[in-house]
Amino acid sequence: MDIFKYFEITAKLDGATETLYGSYDKAEADYELEAMRDSWKDEGYRGIKLGWKATVIAPDAGIYGKDFIAKQA
């Protein structure tokens, strides 16, 4: 069974942790973090960070394309 890394941008708002963005593509998640960080801060989010979680769910080829290779956990 393959295990994949799913990258998530999380932050806290009113004491609760929320997922703001998720992707199997780390470069895409990095881009989103840089593009949206200031906007999320303006909305009140704090502790914005990029992390990942392990999942057995493979990336959807319809979304990522058949040539995309997800990082293994």
Image: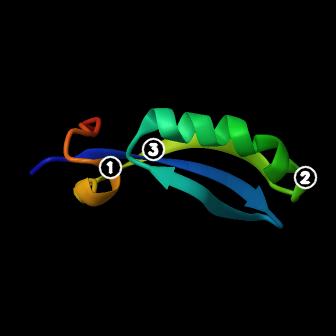
Q: Position of residue 36 (x, y in %)?
A: 73, 45
In the displayed structure image, the side of residue 41 where residue 32 appears, left or right: left
The residue under the point 59% across, 48% down is 9
Q: Position of residue 15 (x, y in %)?
A: 79, 64
In the displayed structure image, the side of residue 28 where residue 16 appears, left or right: right
- The residue under label 3 is which amino acid type? Trp
CB atoms of marks 1 and 2 within 8 Å: no
The residue under the point 62% across, 42% down is 32
Q: Earlier in the sequence, mark 1 or mark 3?
A: 3
Query: How far apart in space, not on screen, are marks 3 and 2 (Cα)?
Result: 24 Å
Instruction: Count numbered badges in the picture.
Output: 3
Residue on which the image places disc 2: 42
Crowding at mark 3 (Cα within 10 Å: few <14, some 14-19, many 20+): some
Crowding at mark 2 (Cα within 10 Å: few <14, some 14-19, many 20+): few
Tell me: residue 29, above or below residue 63: above
Q: Secondary structure at mark 2?
A: helix
Instruction: Report the residue that reaches farthest toward the left.
Output: 1
- The residue under label 2 is which amino acid type? Asp
Q: Earlier in the sequence, mark 1 or mark 2?
A: 2
The residue under the point 32% across, 49% down is 64
Q: Secondary structure at mark 1?
A: helix
The C terminus lies in quadrant: top left
Name the mark nearer the viewer: 3 or 2. 2
Tell me: residue 42, above or below residue 29: below
Viewer-proximal residue among 25 and 65: 65
Query: How far apart in space, not on screen, are marks 1 and 3 (Cα)?
Result: 17 Å
Residue on which the image places disc 3: 52
Q: Position of residue 24 (x, y in %)?
A: 38, 46
Image disc number at residue 64: 1
Viewer-proximal residue among 63 and 73: 63
Q: Secondary structure at mark 3?
A: strand
